[in-house]
Image (cartoon, coloured by chain):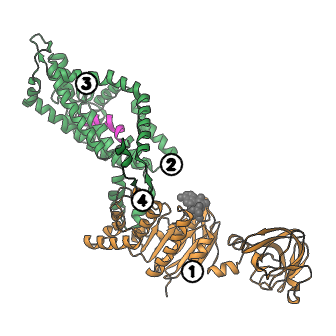
């Protein structure tokens, strides 16, 4: 008790006396009140979000019985060892690769668009934002089938290339088709955070850059880009993570040769009835995503 | 000698708003020049056109004789201190200050040394590692100043740089800015809507109103010899009395009173007589000296405000109230509300201003 009173008075930079105890008490109070308000959300998350995750992790250490059931008694890492097998490894790398390409294409396409959007008048912005959202109004599955028609052997794209004398287009059921579909599906998730962070930019900073002798490009690299980094990182995660685990698009546009993680997991659960392996792949996927998210927060992107 | 900045017939329109209206202006090398005017009069727009952040709709701008027309800002030998400072939030003080040098590909150690020197000059030594968000308003203001000055601009443009500071800091910075400008010998173009600030700091002042340049001159000229009603009213305190020019030595007030006041205006022109409170003498009714008999009016004291160093009288003269400042010392005679008095002033053309 007395130790507290003997604490020397702290001075902050301006030389004002700081009373750490009062501040601390106030902080504590605030935190307690915050916790109370957030309690329903916590309960919801624990019940419906964390619990299934835990089940997945637990199952990934279980054994498949001969009849296709799951035996929870003998804990082992066989399911993880299976991930080292060439087939699974190939699928893992292919998925990572396609997700990466998808993310990069989305970023390159979305950034100029988001920048353009953020520099329009408010009316134009709102209209264009609605256009960005329009795809969400129809079913994702239906839209993927539409792409199948579009890219099919006698589809519009193929007809066009034929008319131009370039021959038939045969990209349906190839990784290219999957990337096209993924870019199409996830582009809005890149555009929106980018738009939000660019729109928030203080334009006088860009003027200051130009005024201080930077060319347009230099200003972009030194000022605009670093300041829109939270949006870039958020957009990349929002595209990369679902691309990595995508199921519908690869299934519809990718054909049999390009099995990706999503399809593999579904096969393990439903067809091969090997739940532990399905669960272990899911767990690895989750860890990858967790690392991505942590990277994001560590890079200072707390404001999105 | 070529002017640091020469503006000829510059007009700037935003759609149908005329922000700057055919302005002609010359700013000399090494001059502390203020652009003064009420909000929305086009000061910032004028400054931004010099900086290249805005291009004129019409007219020509030269910087040390070179036409800058539509040259982008990074190609102009000027730098700006922005109204909100516009410091780069993701860079340290040092990186902010050395930004311009780095863009010009100045050798790294040189850039650092120069920047540190400039940081010391604006008294921020030891804070070079901080981010702008960790600085007070006054410190941020200094960083903005250092960031611009380190590039050795031929002209420094400042857009209400002291606007966000409290009064005391503002006054300190006024003195500092002024001495910094003297030391460096660089032309400063300083935008402000505060006439006292402009008077205290500038070699010359340009008064703007509704996009037009009304008068350019030294603080004394602007204060003592305003050329039009707006300038007389905007700078300091004054009594404006409507009148019409009768001949080259007389004006007639709206109630028919004839006063002596030489003016260069044509007979019949509507003018205003601008009488500063301290330029008016006050005395008991009938005590007007002979030589002032044609430059005097009679009235009664309506109210008295004691200011310590002076006394302000409001004198009712028929249809107008004149503010008169009298000395509070023993020598000066004091009057009470209701006293019958005469007021008079010197015969000069300086105070007849165009409408
Ligand atoms: N980008 C713009 N688009 C349209 N109108 C503008 C623009 N910039 C300025 N204006 C208009 O031009 C006029 C002059 O503006 P300016 O910013 O130069 O005024 P100011 O004298 O700096 O005023 P303040 O003291 O309030 O900063 C104003 O009427 C303003 O509304
Ligand atoms: Mg302004």
Tell me the number on the disc at residue A53.
3
Examine the structure image and report whether residue A47 is included in the region drawn in magenta.
Answer: no
**Chain assignment, label 1:** B
Q: Which chain is orange?
A: B
Mark 1, ligand 1, within 8 Å: the answer is no
The answer to which of marks 2 and 3 sits earlier in the sequence is 3
Using the numbered discs, state the Cα–Cα distance from disc 1 to disc 3 in whole angstroms.
Answer: 74 Å
Location of residue A84 with respect to A18 vertically, above or below: above
Q: Which chain is green?
A: A
In the rendered image, residues at marks 4 and 1 fall on the same chain = yes
Circle 1 crowding by C-alpha within 10 Å: few under 14, some 14–19, many from 20: some
Q: Which residue is mark 2?
A: A121
Q: Are marks 4 and 1 in contact (CB under 8 Å)?
A: no
- Secondary structure under tag 3 reads helix
Residue sitting at x 59%, y 76%: B200
Mark 4, ligand 2, within 8 Å: the answer is no
Q: Are marks 4 and 2 in contact (CB under 8 Å)?
A: no
Quadrant for residue A184, please give it. top left
Q: Nearer the viewer, mark 4 or mark 1?
A: 4
Tell me the number on the disc at residue B203.
1
Tell me the number on the disc at residue A46.
none
- Secondary structure under tag 1 reads loop
Quadrant for residue B13, please give it. bottom right
First to last magenta residue range: A178-191
Using the numbered discs, state the Cα–Cα distance from disc 4 to disc 2 in whole angstroms.
Answer: 34 Å
In the rendered image, residues at marks 4 and 2 fall on the same chain = no
Q: Which residue is mark 4?
A: B135
Between B60 and A262, which is closer to the camera in this rendering?
A: A262
- Secondary structure under tag 2 reads loop
């Amino acid at each position: 008790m007395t130790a507290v009173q003997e604490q020397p008075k702290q001075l902050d930079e301006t030389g004002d006396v700081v009373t750490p105890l009062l501040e601390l008490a106030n902080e504590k109070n605030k935190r307690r009140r915050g916790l109370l308000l957030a309690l329903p959300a916590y309960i919801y998350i624990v019940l419906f979000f964390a619990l299934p995750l835990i089940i997945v992790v637990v199952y990934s250490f279980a054994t498949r019985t001969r009849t296709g059931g799951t035996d929870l008694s003998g804990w082992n890492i066989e399911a993880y060892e299976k991930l080292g097998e060439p087939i699974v490894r190939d699928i893992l790398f292919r998925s990572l690769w396609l997700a990466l390409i998808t993310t990069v294409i989305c970023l390159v396409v979305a950034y100029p668009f988001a920048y353009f959007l953020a520099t329009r008048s408010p009316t134009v912005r709102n209209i264009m934002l609605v256009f960005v959202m329009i795809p969400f109004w129809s079913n994702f599955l239906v839209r993927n089938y539409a792409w199948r028609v579009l890219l099919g052997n006698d589809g519009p794209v193929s007809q066009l290339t034929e008319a131009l004398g370039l021959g038939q287009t045969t990209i349906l059921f190839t990784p290219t088709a999957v990337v096209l579909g993924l870019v199409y599906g996830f582009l809005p998730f890149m555009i929106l955070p980018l738009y939000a962070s660019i729109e928030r930019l203080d334009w006088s900073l860009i003027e200051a850059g130009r005024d201080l002798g930077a060319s347009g490009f230099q200003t972009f690299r030194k000022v605009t880009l670093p300041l829109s980094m939270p949006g870039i990182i958020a957009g990349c995660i929002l595209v990369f993570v679902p691309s990595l685990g995508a199921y519908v698009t690869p299934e519809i546009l990718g054909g049999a040769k390009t099995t990706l993680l999503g399809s593999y997991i579904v096969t393990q659960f439903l067809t091969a009835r090997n739940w532990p392996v399905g669960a272990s792949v899911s767990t690895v996927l989750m860890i990858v995503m967790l690392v991505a998210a942590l990277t994001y927060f560590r890079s200072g992107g707390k404001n999105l | 000698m070529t002017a640091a900045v020469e503006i000829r017939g510059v007009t700037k329109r935003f759609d149908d708003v005329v922000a700057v209206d055919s302005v002609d202006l010359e700013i000399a090398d090494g001059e502390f020049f203020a652009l003064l005017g009420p909000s929305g009069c086009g000061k910032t727009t004028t400054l931004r056109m010099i900086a290249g952040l805005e291009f004129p709709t019409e007219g020509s701008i030269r910087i040390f004789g070179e036409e800058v027309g539509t040259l982008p800002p990074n190609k102009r030998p000027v730098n700006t201190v922005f109204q909100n400072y516009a410091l780069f939030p993701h860079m340290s003080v040092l990186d902010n200050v050395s930004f311009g040098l780095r863009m010009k590909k100045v050798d790294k150690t040189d850039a650092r040394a120069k920047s540190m020197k400039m940081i010391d000059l604006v008294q921020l030594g030891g804070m070079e590692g901080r981010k702008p968000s960790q600085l007070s308003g006054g410190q941020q203001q200094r960083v903005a100043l250092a960031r611009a000055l380190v590039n050795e601009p031929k002209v420094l443009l400042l857009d209400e740089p002291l606007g966000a500071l409290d009064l005391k800091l503002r006054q300190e910075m006024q003195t500092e800015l002024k001495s910094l400008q003297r030391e460096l010998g660089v032309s400063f173009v300083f935008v402000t809507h505060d006439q006292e600030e402009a008077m205290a700091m500038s070699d010359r002042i340009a008064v703007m109103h509704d996009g037009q340049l009304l008068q350019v001159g030294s603080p004394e000229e602007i204060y003592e010899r305003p050329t039009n009603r707006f300038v007389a009213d905007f700078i300091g305190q004054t009594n404006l009395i409507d009148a019409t020019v009768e001949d080259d030595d007389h004006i007639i007030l709206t109630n028919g009173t004839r006063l002596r006041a030489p003016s260069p205006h044509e007979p019949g022109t509507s003018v205003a007589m601008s009488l500063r409170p301290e330029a008016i003498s006050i005395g008991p009714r009938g005590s007007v000296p002979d030589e002032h008999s044609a430059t005097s009016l009679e009235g009664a004291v309506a109210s008295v405000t004691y200011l310590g160093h002076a006394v302000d009288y409001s004198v009712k003269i028929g249809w107008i109230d004149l503010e008169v400042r009298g000395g509070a010392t023993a020598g000066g005679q004091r009057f009470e509300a209701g006293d019958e008095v005469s007021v008079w002033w010197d015969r000069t053309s300086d105070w007849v201003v165009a409408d």
